[in-house]
Image: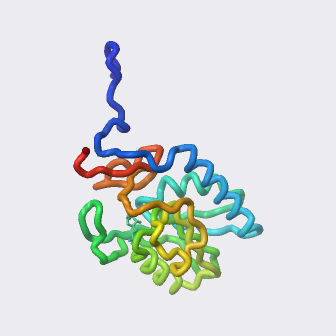
Amino acid sequence: MTSGAVPEPTIDDDPRIGEVLLTEQQIRERIEQIGQQLSQDYEGEAPLLVCVLRGAYVFLTDLARAVNLPVEIDFIAVSSYGSSTRTSGVVRLVKDLDVDLSDRHVILVEDIVDTGLTLRYLRRSLEARNPASLEVCALLAREKADTDGLGVRYVGFRIPDDFVVGYGLDAAERFRNLRYIALYREDGT
Ligand code: 5GP
């Protein structure tokens, strides 16, 4: 509630949110481009967008609307044990798909490719289900990530090694609802 002249704090005022790496507009423009690319590459098809929960859910909703094709969507969830900003190296399936992948053109929609561990796991799991094709579309990839080797066909942005939050990406489940992507400062300094 607003009272008097002092503005209410917003979620953007949290001291753990650092420098903005990608603005809302930059993200929107890049997703439009990827959407156009997908519309060309899959012309005449009805691809299945597989969203990797939870980090990719915001990307998926904007990407799906940027694609001028009759797409279908489904969700898969994996988790890797570890602290809020470090993965442990062990990936586990938490929620499986509902849709049968056989003979489908599948586009795996990921938030960020870091070590590639999650992607390797998902690729193995989905390829075993005999899709007609399987491509990966990641909003972010580390500069160091071997996206060609991992078979990531579409990458929104390459980013440095720092931990980021916003636009679906969390730190201990917070900050997913930021409209931009920012550096995360664990100690808030
Ligand atoms: P990988 O398996 O490629 O090492 O890690 C991929 C997963 O780790 C992503 O799907 C994401 O959930 C998480 N992750 C990696 N880097 C970041 C980051 O900078 N911020 C957030 N919020 N999650 C990250």
Q: Residue at x 53, y 83 (%)?
A: 127
Foreground residue among 171 and 39? 171
Q: Residue at x 65, y 62 (%)?
A: 71
Q: Residue furthest top?
A: 4
Q: Residue at x 60, y 67 (%)?
A: 154
Instruction: Judge from the rendering whether residue 162 lies leftward or rightward of residue 149; answer left or right.
Output: left
Residue 100: percent from left, percent from top: 55, 76
Residue 66: percent from left, percent from top: 65, 53
Q: Residue at x 46, y 50 (%)?
A: 21
Is residue 75 positioned above or below 10 on the image? Answer: below
The answer to whether any part of residue 15 appears in the image is: yes
Q: Quadrant of the N terminus?
A: top left
Residue 87: percent from left, percent from top: 30, 69
Foreground residue among 133 and 25? 25
Is residue 77 positioned above or below 128 on the image? Answer: above
- Identify the image quadrant of residue 156: bottom right
Is residue 131 positioned above or below 67 on the image? Answer: below
Foreground residue among 79 and 104? 79
In terms of image quarters, where does ligand 1 lie? bottom left
The answer to whether any part of residue 75 appears in the image is: no
- Identify the image quadrant of residue 4: top left
What's the colour scheme?
rainbow
Foreground residue among 76 and 56? 56
